C-alpha cells in the first residue's frame, strides 16, 4: 500500500468517526416519531385503522350549533368552522392517531433531521398540487410558515419564534433550523397548513372572511356557502393524493355539508327527523333515555360507542384569575366546595358519569394519588415560588353526600371565604369594605347543559350570600368576550393528548396569559409551570415525559382554576345505519383523523 493511499484511508477513517454518526442519522426517512420508532414501515399499505371495505361516494350531512362569518380558520378575526383547518388544508406530514405522536409523509415524501433535531429538511412530493392544479412549491411553504407565524392565529406563532431560518435547499427541498434545543419542533414543523402564496397577493390575509374561498391541497374544497347557515365541501375529483398509502381507505364521501342550528335541542330534533346523519351525545343519561325514537327502534339509526386511551382533559367552569375577586386561591377553593357535583351529576346524568379528577386523568400521564415522590417531587420542590397547598401532598376534589344542601362542603366554603376576608351579614357575603361578593357566569345561548348546571350551582352560591348573575350571549358575542377575556366565570373545555408538547405553552404559560385570543383562559402565571413547560419540550423519554406531566397536573389541580364536571367516557355517536366505520379504532379514538376521515356510506 502506497504512502498516499495510507494517508487517504486514514483521512477517510477520521472523517467517518468525526461525522459518521451525523451522516448515518441524517438520512431521509418516511416518518418521524417523538420518542419511539414509527410503527409503520416505509412501504406500509395504509393506516392501521382504515378499512379495505370502505366505499367511495355519498353525501354526509353534519349538524353544528352556532354560526360562522369566515372561511379562513388561520386568523384571529372572525368565526370560522373549526373543521376547515383539517378538511380543507394539508400539511407536509400527516399524523397517525394510533400512535402517541408519529408523523408520516403527506405533502412531503421524506423528512431528514440533524443529529439533535436542531434542523429539519422536507422533500416535497413531485405530484403534490393545489386544488387549482398548480404545483406546491418551496416558495408556498416558506410564505405559509412566515405568514401564519407572524400574522396568523396564536396557535401558529409560537413555532415561528423558535425558527432561526427557513430556506430553499433544492428544487423541492426546504430546510428549517431552530434557535433552541427542542426535539419536538422538527415534528411541529411538519404540521403547519400549506397555503397558496399567489392567492393572497392582493388580499389582506388578516381581514379575510367569507369572500375568499381557499385554494388548498386537500381532498375537499368548498363548493357552496350560505353565510352563517351552511357550508358544503365537495371531494376534488383531481385530488393529487388519492393513491397515497396514507390516504388509502380515507376521505370516502363525495360531499360533506355542515348545517348550523340555533341550539342543541333544535339540532337533535333535526337529527331525529333525518335532516342530518350523525349526532354526538356527551350525556350518558340522555344516551340511555332519549335515544328511543322510531328511527332507533327500527334500526335506521345505530348507537355506537367508540373507546379511547387518551387523557380526559379538563371540562367545567373556569374562573378568570385575572379578576381580583378570583385571585385568592381560597376563594377558588370555596367556589369548588360550593359546587355540589354529586347532586348535579344525579340530576344531569342519573349519576352515570364520573367526575374528572385531573387534567391528565385516565392516562399514564396523570398525577398519582397521595404525596409527590421520586422525579415528580424533585421537579416540584426546587421552586422559587410558594407552591399552593395540595401541590406536594396531593389534591383531591371535595366529595359531597349527594343531598341538595351539601352541608359539610358549604361549611368548608364559608370557612375559606372567611379566611379570604369575606363574612356573611344579613344574608349577604361582604368584604371588609361592605361590598357584596358578586360575579357573573357567561354562557352561550343554546348551551343547555351548562345552563342547567349553572342554575343549580347558582342556588348554592346564593345560599352563601353571593350575588351571582347568569349572562346569556349569542354565539358571536360570547366568543368575542371569551377572546377578549371579558368574563368572570365561563364554561371551559381543554382536550389533551398522549404526547403533550409545544401546544401546552398556549394553554398554561405566562407568556400567553394576557394576550387576546389566548387559550390560557384561567390566566395562570406560574414560574414553576413555565419551567416545566420548558422541560417538557426537551424530554427524551416516555418516563421523563410522565414525570413532567404529573408535576404539571399537580400544579393545575392545586391552582384550583376550574370547577371540574364529568368526563364523557367513550364517544357516544348515533348515526344513520348506512354510515360505517372500521372495526379497529385508533388509540386516540373518535378524534380528528377518525371521523369523517375513515367512515363511509354503504350503498
Image: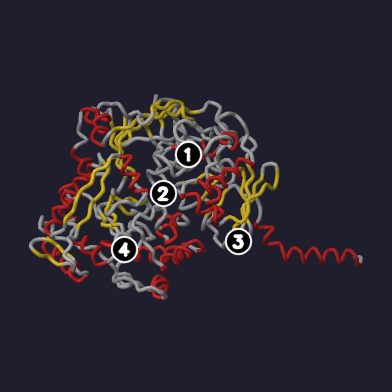
Distance, label 1 to label 4, CA atoms, is 38 Å
For this rendering, which residue is in front, 300 or 568? Answer: 568
Q: Quadrant of the C terminus?
A: top left
Mark with earlier residue (3, 4): 3
The numbered disc on residue 557 is: 4
Q: State whether residue 301 is above or below residue 334.
A: above
Whether the residues at callouts 3 and 4 have beta carbons within 8 Å, the answer is: no
For this rendering, which residue is in front, 40 or 452? Answer: 452
Mark 1 or 4, closer to the camera: 1
For this rendering, which residue is in front, 493 or 128? Answer: 493
Mark with earlier residue (4, 2): 4
Query: Residue drawn 20% across and 71% down?
Result: 419
Mark 3 or 1, closer to the camera: 1
Mark 3 or 4, closer to the camera: 4
For label 3, the SS is loop
Residue 405 visible in rendering: yes
Mark with earlier residue (1, 4): 1
Amino acid at each position: 500500500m502506497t504512502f498516499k493511499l495510507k494517508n487517504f484511508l486514514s483521512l477517510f477513517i477520521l472523517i467517518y468517526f468525526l461525522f459518521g454518526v451525523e451522516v448515518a442519522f441524517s438520512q431521509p426517512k418516511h416518518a418521524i416519531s417523538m420518542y419511539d420508532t414509527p410503527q409503520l414501515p416505509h412501504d406500509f399499505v395504509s393506516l392501521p385503522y382504515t378499512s379495505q371495505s370502505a366505499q367511495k361516494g355519498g353525501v354526509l350531512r353534519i349538524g353544528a350549533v352556532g354560526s360562522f362569518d369566515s372561511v379562513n380558520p388561520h386568523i384571529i378575526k372572525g368565526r370560522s368552522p373549526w373543521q376547515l383547518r383539517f378538511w380543507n388544508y394539508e400539511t407536509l406530514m400527516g399524523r397517525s392517531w394510533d400512535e402517541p405522536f408519529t408523523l408520516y409523509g403527506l405533502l412531503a415524501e421524506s423528512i431528514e433531521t440533524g443529529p439533535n433535531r436542531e434542523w429539519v429538511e422536507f422533500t416535497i412530493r413531485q405530484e403534490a398540487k393545489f386544488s387549482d392544479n398548480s404545483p406546491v412549491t418551496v416558495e408556498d411553504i416558506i410564505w405559509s410558515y412566515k405568514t401564519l407565524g407572524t400574522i396568523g392565529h396564536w396557535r401558529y406563532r409560537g413555532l415561528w419564534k423558535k425558527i432561526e431560518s427557513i430556506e430553499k435547499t433544492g428544487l423541492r427541498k426546504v430546510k428549517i433550523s431552530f434557535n433552541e434545543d427542542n426535539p419536538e419542533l422538527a415534528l411541529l414543523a411538519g404540521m403547519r397548513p400549506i397555503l397558496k402564496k399567489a392567492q393572497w397577493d392582493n388580499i389582506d390575509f388578516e381581514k379575510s372572511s367569507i369572500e375568499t374561498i381557499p385554494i388548498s391541497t386537500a381532498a375537499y374544497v368548498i363548493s357552496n356557502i350560505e353565510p352563517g347557515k351552511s357550508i358544503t365541501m365537495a371531494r376534488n375529483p383531481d385530488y393529487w393524493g388519492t393513491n397515497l398509502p396514507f390516504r388509502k381507505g380515507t376521505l370516502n364521501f363525495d360531499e360533506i355539508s355542515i348545517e348550523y342550528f340555533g341550539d342543541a335541542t333544535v339540532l337533535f330534533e333535526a337529527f331525529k327527523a333525518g335532516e342530518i346523519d350523525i349526532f354526538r351525545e356527551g350525556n350518558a343519561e340522555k344516551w340511555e333515555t332519549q335515544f328511543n325514537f322510531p328511527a332507533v327502534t327500527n334500526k335506521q339509526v345505530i348507537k355506537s360507542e367508540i373507546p379511547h386511551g387518551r387523557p380526559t382533559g379538563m371540562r367545567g367552569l373556569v374562573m378568570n384569575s385575572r379578576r381580583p375577586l378570583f385571585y385568592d386561591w381560597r376563594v377558588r377553593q370555596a367556589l369548588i366546595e360550593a359546587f355540589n357535583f354529586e347532586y348535579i351529576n344525579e340530576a344531569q346524568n342519573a349519576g352515570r358519569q364520573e367526575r374528572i379528577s385531573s387534567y391528565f386523568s385516565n392516562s399514564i400521564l396523570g398525577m398519582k394519588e397521595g404525596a409527590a415522590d421520586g422525579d415528580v417531587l424533585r421537579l416540584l420542590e426546587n421552586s422559587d415560588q410558594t407552591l399552593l397547598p395540595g401541590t406536594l401532598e396531593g389534591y383531591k376534589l371535595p366529595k359531597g353526600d349527594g343531598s341538595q344542601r351539601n352541608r359539610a362542603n358549604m361549611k368548608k366554603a364559608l370557612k375559606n371565604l372567611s379566611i379570604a376576608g369575606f363574612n356573611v351579614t344579613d344574608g349577604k357575603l361582604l368584604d371588609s369594605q361592605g361590598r357584596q361578593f358578586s360575579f357573573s357566569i357567561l354562557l352561550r345561548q343554546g348551551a343547555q347543559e351548562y345552563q342547567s348546571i349553572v342554575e343549580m350551582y347558582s342556588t348554592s352560591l346564593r345560599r352563601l350570600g353571593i350575588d351571582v348573575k347568569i349572562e346569556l350571549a349569542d354565539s358571536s358575542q360570547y366568543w368575542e368576550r371569551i377572546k377578549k377575556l371579558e368574563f368572570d366565570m365561563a364554561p371551559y373545555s381543554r382536550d389533551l393528548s398522549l404526547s403533550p408538547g409545544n401546544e401546552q405553552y398556549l394553554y398554561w404559560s405566562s407568556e400567553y396569559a394576557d394576550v387576546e385570543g389566548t387559550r390560557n383562559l384561567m390566566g395562570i402565571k406560574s414560574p414553576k409551570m413555565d419551567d416545566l413547560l420548558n422541560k417538557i419540550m426537551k424530554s427524551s423519554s416516555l418516563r421523563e415525559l410522565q414525570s413532567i406531566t404529573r408535576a404539571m397536573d399537580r400544579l393545575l389541580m392545586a391552582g384550583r382554576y376550574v370547577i371540574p364536571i364529568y368526563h364523557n367516557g367513550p364517544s357516544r355517536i348515533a348515526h344513520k345505519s348506512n354510515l360505517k366505520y372500521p372495526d379497529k379504532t385508533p388509540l386516540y379514538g373518535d378524534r380528528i383523523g377518525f371521523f369523517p376521515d375513515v367512515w363511509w356510506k354503504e350503498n
